[in-house]
Image: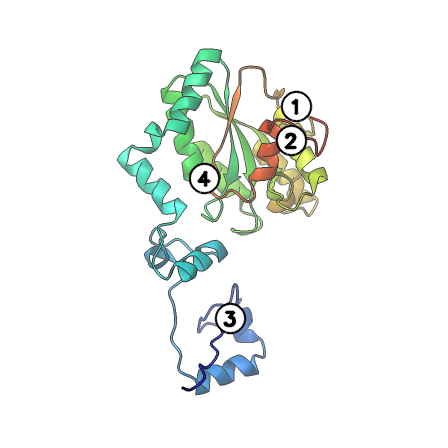
Amino acid sequence: MSKPTPVVLCILDGWGLRANPSDNAPALAATPTFDRIMAECPNSTLVTHGPDVGLPSGQMGNSEVGHTNIGAGRVVAMDLGQIDLAIEDGSFAKRPALQDFIAALDASGGRAHLAGLVSAGGVHSHQAHMAEAAMILADAGIRTVVHAIADGRDVPPRSAHECMARLRSAMPPGAEIVTVSGRYFAMDRDNRWDRVERAFRAIVMGQGEASESESVAVDDAYAKGITDEFIPPTVLAGYGGINAGDGIFFTNFRADRAREIMAAIAAPGFDAFET
């Protein structure tokens, strides 16, 4: 019996094929080994975005999406698309977690604090989901404030104005953005608690840099050469923190970069820094 020939699955994360060399690192770089493989070996291409990988049409892929579909060997419906469908068919508003959240706030009389990445990137969140949650809460008579996390990684580094303007236009009257923070602080996942603490203090205690609006906070950051990802946790006019009876609802659907900030806010026995 012949010995099986080894097979290697080598994933080049972020490597794509596009004829136009503009802003195209693989095409512009010297890649003799890759060029030889493509010239001499059987090859094909994969579609890594949209419905072929379980995403809505026109939605770019990402590392998690690619690895999930390759590992499963089939198209896997990703969270982004499933939430979009749930919003479309009305089942999102009926989800037990959201209904329990509404019931608790109705009983306490507290405010809802929506927190999440304000981005159309679709990797960790989508701003349309936050806007929909705000509408559902408003329809239930719950006062709502928003803690906006600026992206700058899954979308262009200076796109916060556009993203937040779209969110604001889609939110119900009375819902206000009360803090802004770059994801560098609010979405750490490597136990860099000094960063997380700054986002925590802005969200929970109303402490941090101050600004009159999210637009001014973004402009001030840009004036200092700071892009969206690194906007320091900033408290907007009049916000004093989370009060007794309030509740927080995190709208990111990907958990890895939400765990630390939510642990600081809600986990019993949390001790990475003083809360």
**Callout 2, which amino acid?**
Phe
Is the C-beta separation of discs 1 and 2 under 8 Å? yes
Whether residue 68 is situated above or below residue 268 in the rendered picture: below
Q: Is residue 259 visible?
A: yes
Q: Nearer the viewer, residue 225 or 27?
A: 27
Q: Where residue 103 sits in the image (x, y, percent)?
A: 41, 18
Name the secondary structure under disc 3: loop
Whole-number angstrom distance, CA of label 3 to CA of label 2: 39 Å
**In terms of sequence position, does the residue under pointer 4 or pointer 3 come before the other?**
3
Q: Which residue is mark 1?
A: 205
Give the farthest residue toward the front: 1
Residue 63's x, y, as percent?
49, 57
Separation of disc 1 and disc 3 at Cα? Answer: 47 Å
Inspect the image, locate mark 4, and give the three-letter code of the amino acid beneath it.
Answer: Gln
* Lower position in the chain sequence, tag 1 or tag 3: 3
Considering only vertical position in the picture, is 256 above or below 4? above
Q: Label 2 near label 4: C-beta < 8 Å? A: no
Q: Name the residue at 69% across, 34% down.
A: 198
Which amino acid, by three-letter code, is at mark 3?
Cys
Local crowd at mark 3 within 10 Å, few (<14), some, or many (≥20)? few
Mark sitting on residue 88: none
Circles 1 and 3, Cβ within 8 Å, touching? The answer is no
Towards the viewer: 23 or 260: 260
Residue visible at 52% across and 64% down in the picture: 13
- Which image quadrant is residue 189 in? top right
Residue 78 % position (x, y): 39, 49
Image position of 118 with respect to 53: above or below: above
Q: Mark 4 or mark 1, which is nearer the start of the sequence?
A: 4
The residue labelled by disc 2 is: 200
Instruction: For label 4, count other residues whose C-alpha is less than 10 Å away and answer few (under 14), some (14-19) or many (20+).
Output: many
